[in-house]
Amino acid sequence: MASRRGDPNAPVRTRGRPATSKKHAADSAAPAGTSPAPRVLDTLFEAWRAAGAEYAVEALRNRRHGDLPRWMAALETLPDVRPTEVSLGATVSAGGESLNDTTYEQLHRALRGLIPWRKGPFHLFGIDIDSEWRSDLKWARIVDHLDLDGSRVLDVGSGNGYYGWRMLEAGARSVTGIDPSQLATLQHAAVAHYMDRGAAGIANRNTVLPVRLEDFEAGEPYDVVFSMGVVYHRRDPMAHVQHLVRHTHARTTLVLESLVVDGAPLEPRERYARMRNIWLVPDIGTLCSWLEAVGFGFTQVADVSPTTPREQRSTDWMPFESLRDALDRADPALTIEGYPAPKRAVMIARRP
Ligand SMILES: C[S@@+](CC[C@H](N)C(=O)[O-])C[C@H]1O[C@@H](n2cnc3c(N)ncnc32)[C@H](O)[C@@H]1O
């Protein structure tokens, strides 16, 4: 089996989060009656330690999301099967071997235990994880504008690491994803579990750490830094961009993807497209000025596209409200709050 030790990513650490406890969260999380081998959480924590991120083990253990024990239990019941085929294509997949009914049911139940799946799609041993987002569509709008060959990548707000697999496909040497969502981290661990077992050296090249950008310190800067779908969630977007720059060197490419509006930036009164946590939706000029202010003077607007219900929708694997419920039924060019419907821009910036 491929080992997740020896992560090629540079050691990472966060400020003010010393590693203390030696007890694994998995020790108390595995449900009675299951004897998975190997223990997925142990493997995950081992990978984080190998990446110098002991603090991530602490972070996962100490944050008390009410659903965490259930998610951890789901992870620990992933069956011990090895794929013969792995794909990092539009549907990230592992499989090849057909499972007997019991094992298929066990895998299905474990993956359903990690609902909602927002980013994807994935396909594991005959199970289609049809996520809320067709993240492959966003990636298709970006990938041809970049050269990731041999690069060390930081993906800020990585979600469950879907794009990390695609970045490896596009030639990245390693990807470090960071995202404070515990569920996204655990979904990544579930997928990586099978990637790891099927293709030597793949899983340890795509890591997702449960940490916020503001708390993340890398040992060395990255060649390509992505922030996709994050900046408008930040109360202080300029501070977000400044934090991104801390992880760059003189030749780093910075990819900033954001909701945008035409005209003046939009500060939603309360919600935007039903989301409470949108502070400011910039126009393209404002995005350029933020990037310029931190020394990224050459900015290419690689794509501007509306977000449609084809790309973001409720599914079996994300059964809650989605984009369609956030648009004005009479006029889908508007959100239900009367703002312009979502559209997104991909900015690719370099230093002059
Ligand atoms: C809208 S999702 C975008 C996910 C993915 N990058 C994409 O483009 O599809 C925003 C993600 O940013 C993460 N996030 C929010 N605040 C963050 C922060 N301070 N540092 C890193 N990630 C953050 C959220 O947990 C969430 O997974």
Image (tube, rainbow, N blue to C red):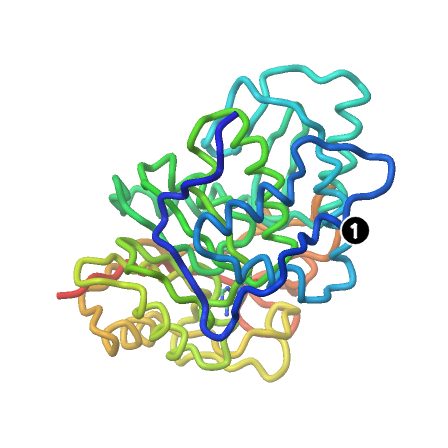
Q: Residue at x 67, y 66 (%)?
A: 62
Q: Residue at x 26, y 53 (%)?
A: 223
Residue 75 in the image: state x and y as whole percent.
70, 42
Q: Residue at x 71, y 34 (%)?
A: 78
Q: Which residue is mark 1?
A: 70
Q: Nearer the viewer, residue 5 or 303?
A: 5
Residue 68 in the image: state x and y as whole percent.
74, 57
Q: Please say if 278 is above or below 327.
A: below
Is 238 placed left or right of 109 in the picture?
A: left
Residue 303 in the image: state x and y as whole percent.
34, 54
| Neighbour tally class for label 1: few under 14, some 14-19, many 20 plus, Cα within 10 Å | some
Q: Amino acid at mark 1?
A: Arg
Q: Please say if 284 is above or below 74.
A: below
Tell me where residue 348 sits by quadrant: bottom left
Q: SS class of the residue under badge 1?
A: helix
**Outermost residue, bottom direction?**
269
Q: Please say if 139 is above or below 198.
A: below
Q: Residue at x 17, y 63 (%)?
A: 250
Is 167 placed left or right of 144 in the picture?
A: right
Is 233 placed left or right of 169 in the picture?
A: right
Q: Quadrant of the C terminus?
A: bottom left
Q: Is mark 1 within 8 Å of ligand 1?
A: no
**Outermost residue, left direction?**
352
Tell me where residue 332 sits by quadrant: bottom right
**Outermost residue, right direction?**
33
